Image: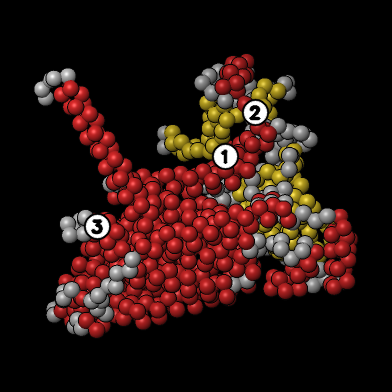
Amino acid sequence: MNKKMKGALGLLAVLAITVGFCFLGVHGAKDIKLGLDLNGGVSITYQTTEDNPTSEQMSDTVYKLQLKAQGYSTEAQVYQEGSNRINIDIPGATDANEILEELGEPGTLQFADSQGQVLLTGDDVKNASAGMTDQNGSRQYIIQLQFNEAGAKKFADATAANVGKPLYIIYNDQIISAPNVQEAITGGQASITGITDYDEATRIASTIRIGALPVQLTELRSNVIGATLGQEAISTSLRAGLVGLVLVMLFMIAVYRLPGFVASLALIMYTGLELVLLQAFEVTLTLPGIAGIILSVGMAVDANVIIFTRMKEELGAGRTIEQAVKAGYSKALSAIIDGNVTTLIAAAVLYLRGSGTVKGFATTLAIGIVISLITALFVTRALLACFISFGCTSPALYGVRKDVKILDFIKFRKIAYTISAVVIIAGFLFMGMNKASLGNLFNYDLDFQGGSSTNVTFNEDMSLEEIDAKVAPIFKNITGGTASVQASKVAGTNEVIIKTRTLTTEERTELYKDLVDEFQVDEAKITTENISGAVSKEMKADAVWAFLIAIVCMLIYIWIRFKDIKFASAAVMALTHDVLITTAFYAALKWAVGSTFIACILTIVGYSINATIVVFDRIRENLEDPTKRGDLANVVNDAISQTFTRSINTSLTTFIMVLVLFVMGVSSIRDFTMPLMVGIVSGCWSSVTIAGPLWYDLSMYAAKKKAAKKAAEKAAKAEKKSQKMQKGQQV
């Protein structure tokens, strides 16, 4: 078989796999789970029967309900509202009654003897789980109970006093199980046997777990809520994503020619494989999850850009096409691996420490990074090998980069530092102005500050686009035009829920009048409830800790890989710069700061660290050249100039994706994509003008400090020698 035949078969194989992934991905896209912010779900509100539960009781209750709710969706959120309410949001669910039945209405759990004497309560139970055993070839279903320290002693006494008798497990005055005690049980663990099937065991165990809450809860509200973005917004986002993908592919082909075409084919495979894995891992997709996909698409393109730029340099140095491809992949490997691993570290930490939407972001980002590595390092290389086998070996098809114009970024660094400092300082000034005018440093959204939830039942069913165009302006006018307005629909009804900042009595009266005049709604069907922040203190604390731990882990990895803490320090300083720049724009333009703010900042951090790593990798490579090592300024200038095209092109491709989403998306998408565009520009700016020069300044400071130390040691030795000579001693 000749080379052309091998190339043809290889190309057909890759194309067939690509078509297969795309078919499976698109065909099953409807099965991808969507979060509350994309596709609605079940929202349940409970209130304690006790008016003033302790903070410890509420915290423990939230924790236990979170564990239970996450069994239905990893994106489930449980958060406290006020002093005695708990809200549960389970995205993707459509039957509130079914969820309520399975979740169980939290109430009172008791263990009692045949005389009705209460021996234990739910407070004594640590955990309950369903299981199976196999005895003599017969499968039996059991419930495994685990008690806390106090409960273990009570259970031991109870079983010892009731051997041969039943113990009644009572939930909300109803007997859910009555197992016979066979012997006294110590150690705090026991099993209930004789269960008819696994479903029954699961139901009873779930009831025991949910009943083992430190407070008694009553249901206040349960309903199926519509999507915040709505089906219209989802279809709009899909169209925007497709347009953005096509524009990125055209850009790659225009700039990188045949390799750009190859990368475009790989990007199509990447998209199909991403959809397949979202279905395979049953990932619940949320708005922050979309952010993770956007970032990973940018990184998928970035890996190819790094490789193709290297190939152009090798062709410019006189290498053949085969040699240039081999060298391009070899020399780009370390930058690609380091950039992706640092972002994977961040994704892993965020998943382990974060909760709710933060986990969604981390999941889609991690999946995207792994796929991007596979497509960039293996798929595009295989495709290039196929085209080379066809005889596509003309340098004109690949582009040749003979000369790199070296710019003096070190000389420019003070100007760059000043520009960034001015923007950051301006951000702090705007925060102060916001504090004076809004009462807060930022324009906090309902998620972070709480506010009013207004339920309006219209005379006709309205789409979210109509609500956006006709209803939202009324609320914005009432609130002064700066506050965010979030609208969602209650499935199967004409009811709309609109959340804004807290409304005063006067504003509420005016709002009701405007709604009645404009839409002829029944004022009796308008209700408003003031609510606390939807993002609990615990969730915000988890997000902050996840962010800090991710930064530390990335710092350690960069320190180990580059064998120089100055690289790690400069990278973290550059990341901090990007976060401060973005928050400055949040303050200046009064963008709403809510749950998407966290996702936006995390997206920017992941994007920025990857761009910085590419520059640092080239600095490390240049330091290995004995002819350059002596002049650190030239080392940095060469590295930034050599990677400048990559920095601009990668930023452009990612910016294109986000810009199309901004132009074509609905208002809630724009609220997210606008700051993301700022972050992309800031990340490009910092990787080109800030990160490398910071490493240079840290290196020069370390060199001066080392020289000063040596000089001091030399002076001390000279002084000691002089003193000895003065005493007439010989050295």
Q: Do the residues labelled 3 and 1 touch (CB within 8 Å)?
A: no
Count of numbered badges drawn on the protein: 3
Measured as percent of width and height from the top left, residue 144 is found at 53, 32
> Which quarter of the picture shows residue 488?
bottom right
Q: Where's the C terminus, which quadrant? A: top left
Q: What element carries label 3?
A: loop
Which numbered disc, 2 or 1, marks the residue closer to the eye? 2
Give the labeled residue for mark 1: 201
Q: Do the residues labelled 2 and 3 touch (CB within 8 Å)?
A: no
Few, some or many residues within 10 Å of mark 3 (<14, 14–19, 20+) = few
Q: Residue at the location (67% across, 27% down)? A: 121
Q: Are marks 2 and 1 in contact (CB under 8 Å)?
A: no
> Of the numbered discs in the image, which one, if any, rests on residue 631?
3
> Of the numbered discs in the image, which one, if any, rests on residue 123?
2
Q: Where's the N terminus, which quadrant? A: bottom left
Rounded to the nearest angstrom, the CA distance separating label 3 from label 1 is: 72 Å
In front: 56, or 547? Answer: 547
Q: Residue at the location (32% across, 78% down)? A: 256
Q: Earlier in the sequence, mark 2 or mark 3?
A: 2
> Which quarter of the picture shows residue 490?
bottom right
Measured as percent of width and height from the top left, residue 672 is found at 58, 64
